[in-house]
Structures are given as structure tokens and as C-alpha cells.
Image: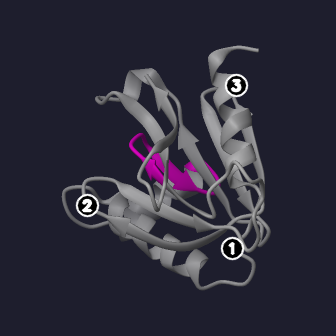
């Protein structure tokens, strides 16, 4: 198992069964997830996923068309991402059912069939991490996926 596969397996263990409880934005989006029950005694109840690489909802071509049509400002995808996160947060079943991997792409599927995609394409990135996961309470890093 390579490093990417290992990280995806850990990410899946941390995220599956949790629901998105909130999100915030400063330089990057941070999605907060809560477990209704203690998934494992070694896992915290509340975790934060900060995404630093490109990410989107659904099919990439459809996403790009919507950003062109509705996006505004310097980073036109950011208002669309915030809108989609708000819809997800207040939708039925914002629980994560699957975390998968395709070439250079993490796919997080929710029980309501919404899919969040995180790019692992190195050529498009200008930072040190694709994402990192922290314990909301202690702020200890649980998992980081470096470039």
C-alpha cells in the first residue's frame, strides 16, 4: 500500500459515519464533522477537515460550467462552494457514507448522494498540503496529506 492509499484509508476511517455539523472559511474552507456516537475510542467526536487543494461537488465539467455561470469575484468558485456547503449542512442525511479514491482524486460521498471531490493533482497546487484533519477540541493534527 502506497502513502496515498494509506492516507485515504485513514481518512475514510475518520470520516465514515460522521455528519457535517458546520463549516468556516478564511484562507481555506474547513468542514467540521461530528460523530453521533464514539466511532472508536481512539477517534475524537469532533474533527475538522481543512481543504487546501482544488475541490468541488459532483461532476467536474458540470461544476466548472456552474462556476462560469454563477461565480463572482477573484476566486469565483468560493461563493459557489459556500452555497453548496450550506445546502449540504441543512440537508437531510449529511452523513458520510463512503470515502474513495480514483487517480489523483478523493471522493467523499454523503448518504444524500452528494459527492465532494478533492484534487490530489500536484501540478495545480501552490502550497504544502492537499488537506489536513485535526481534532476540534485539542487541535492536534490527526492526518495530513502533503504534496
Identify the residue at image location x=59%, y=65%: 33
Most foreground residue, 1 or 104: 1
Image coords of residue 85 (percent x, y): 51, 71
In the picture, the quarter occupied by the N terminus is top right
**Mark 2 nearby-residue class (10 Å; few <14, some 14–19, many ≥20):** few
Residue that label 2 marks: 26
Height in image: 101 above or below 62?
above
Closer to us: mark 2 or mark 3?
3
Q: What is the secondary structure assignment of the residue under circle 2? A: loop
Q: Earlier in the sequence, mark 2 or mark 1?
A: 2
Identify the residue at image location x=57%, y=78%: 89
Closer to us: mark 3 or mark 1?
3
Most foreground residue, 102 or 42: 42
Residues at badges 3 and 1 in contact (C-beta under 8 Å)?
A: no
Q: What is the secondary structure assignment of the residue under circle 3? A: helix
Identify the residue at image location x=69%, y=73%: 94
Most foreground residue, 83 or 42: 42
Occupied quadrant, residue 20:
bottom right
In the picture, the quarter occupied by the C terminus is top left
**6 drawn magenta:** no
**59 drawn magenta:** yes
Residue that label 1 marks: 94
Q: Earlier in the sequence, mark 2 or mark 3?
A: 3
Most foreground residue, 69 or 94: 94
Residue 10: mark = none
Residue that label 3 marks: 6
Question: What's the magenta region?
Answer: 49-60
**Mark 3 nearby-residue class (10 Å; few <14, some 14–19, many ≥20):** few
Image coords of residue 11 (percent x, y): 66, 42
* 107 left or right, relative to 26: right
* 8 left or right, relative to 33: right
Amino acid at each position: 500500500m502506497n502513502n496515498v492509499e494509506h492516507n485515504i484509508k485513514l481518512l475514510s476511517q475518520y470520516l465514515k459515519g460522521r455528519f457535517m455539523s458546520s463549516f468556516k472559511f478564511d484562507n481555506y474552507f474547513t468542514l467540521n464533522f461530528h460523530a453521533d456516537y464514539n466511532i472508536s475510542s481512539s477517534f475524537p467526536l469532533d474533527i475538522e477537515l481543512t481543504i487546501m487543494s482544488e475541490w468541488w461537488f459532483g461532476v467536474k465539467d458540470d461544476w466548472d460550467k456552474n462556476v462560469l455561470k454563477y461565480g463572482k469575484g477573484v476566486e469565483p468558485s468560493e461563493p459557489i462552494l459556500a452555497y453548496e456547503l450550506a445546502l449540504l449542512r441543512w440537508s437531510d442525511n449529511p452523513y458520510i457514507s463512503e470515502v474513495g479514491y480514483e487517480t489523483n482524486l478523493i471522493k467523499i460521498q454523503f448518504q444524500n448522494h452528494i459527492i465532494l471531490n478533492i484534487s490530489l493533482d500536484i501540478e495545480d497546487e501552490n502550497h504544502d498540503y492537499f488537506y489536513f484533519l485535526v481534532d476540534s477540541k485539542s487541535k492536534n493534527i490527526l492526518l495530513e496529506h502533503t504534496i
